[in-house]
């Protein structure tokens, strides 16, 4: 059973990653304790944990404040994820995957195929794809069977838009969402085929290329969204992105 501090860490992380707090905002222990109906002691421990994760910063004069993430920082994080996940795909192919893992990966591919049968896609479809995408990538990391690698991959959960389950799609053009999903789905199929064939080199290269493709789209969308403040209301994570 999760402790009170663990619950607060999880809740605050969720609020931070969904834009409840602005970059640079001070995280006042008293206010948070009242908001979450708890005492200040576990709140302080939770804030310390989130600072260790990198979502908050601590200074003696101001206490805990919400960290500012630049587009450059996010892009660099995705570059690192590309290398690590490429390694995960290589190890998964080398090790071979279980029947259960095979079924899971095939299931994720089928779900996205079904999603793409819709004539028109909207933002809820983009969110659904993001969830499936995160599960697909996490399954490959798990199949790598490397504890240190898994621990390192957890770091990306605390960087806006760096994790596979994040979504960067613009509400101004839903056809762009379809194009992104279609390309990602084809990439996923190539990665899956290479892993099943136990071709470790092809699996690594395919997954690295897939993340590289996603990185290009992310950079384009982030730049576009920052130029239009209206979109910030639709994409609250931008409250943490400041250049």
Image (cartoon, rainbow, N blue to C red):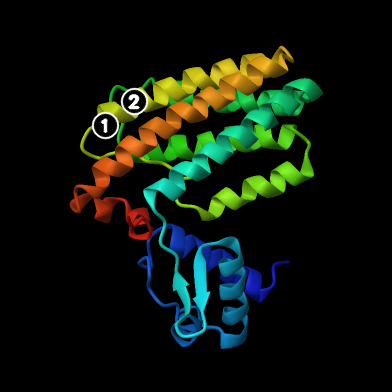
Q: Residue at x 55, y 62 (%)?
A: 54
Front-most of 116 and 21? 21
The residue identified by callout 1 is: 174
Q: Residue at x 71, y 12 (%)?
A: 197
State whether residue 7 is above or below residue 172. Answer: below
Residue 87, image x and y in percent? Answer: 68, 30
State whether residue 199 is above or below residue 108. Answer: above
Horizontally, residue 4 falls left or right of residue 189, namely right
Indicate the quadrant containing the N terminus: top left, top right, bottom left or bottom right.
bottom right
Residue 210, image x and y in percent? Answer: 51, 25
Instruction: Quote the CA–CA distance across marks 1 and 2.
Output: 7 Å
Is residue 47 in sight in this rendering?
yes
Front-most of 239 and 124? 239
Which quadrant of the view contains residue 53?
A: bottom right
Horizontally, residue 72 falls left or right of residue 58, namely left
| Tag 1 near tag 2, CB within 8 Å | yes
Q: Residue at x 76, y 46 (%)?
A: 148
Is residue 39 in sight in this rendering?
no
Residue 51's tag is none
Which quadrant of the view contains residue 3?
A: bottom right
Front-most of 63 and 142? 63
Disc tally is: 2
- Other residues around mark 2 within 10 Å, as few (<14) / some (14–19) / many (≥20): many
State whether residue 146 is above or below residue 230. Answer: above
The residue identified by callout 2 is: 178
- Other residues around mark 1 within 10 Å, as few (<14) / some (14–19) / many (≥20): some
Q: Residue at x 78, y 25 (%)?
A: 98
Horizontally, residue 138 falls left or right of residue 68, namely right
Indicate the quadrant containing the C terminus: top left, top right, bottom left or bottom right.
bottom left
């Amino acid at each position: 059973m999760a402790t009170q501090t663990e619950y607060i860490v999880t809740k605050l992380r969720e609020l931070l990653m969904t834009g409840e707090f602005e970059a640079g905002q001070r995280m006042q222990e008293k206010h948070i304790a009242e908001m979450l109906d708890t005492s200040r002691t576990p709140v302080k421990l939770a804030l310390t944990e989130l600072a260790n994760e990198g979502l908050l910063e601590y200074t003696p004069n101001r206490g805990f404040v919400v960290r500012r993430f630049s587009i450059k920082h996010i892009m660099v994080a995705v570059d690192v994820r590309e290398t690590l996940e490429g390694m995960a795909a290589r190890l998964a192919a080398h090790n071979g995957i279980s029947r259960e893992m095979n079924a899971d990966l095939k299931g994720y591919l089928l779900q996205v195929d079904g999603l793409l049968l819709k004539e028109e896609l909207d933002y809820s479809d983009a969110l659904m794809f993001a969830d499936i995408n995160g599960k697909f990538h996490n399954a490959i990391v798990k199949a790598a069977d490397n504890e240190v690698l898994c621990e390192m991959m957890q770091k990306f959960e605390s960087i806006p838009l760096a994790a596979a389950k994040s979504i960067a799609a613009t509400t101004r053009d839903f056809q762009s969402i379809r194009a992104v999903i279609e390309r990602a789905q084809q990439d996923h199929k190539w990665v899956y085929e290479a892993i099943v064939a136990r071709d470790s080199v092809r699996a690594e290269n395919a997954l690295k290329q897939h993340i590289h493709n996603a990185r290009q789209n992310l950079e384009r969308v982030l730049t576009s969204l920052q130029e239009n403040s209206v979109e910030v209301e639709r994409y609250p994570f931008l409250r943490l992105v400041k250049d």
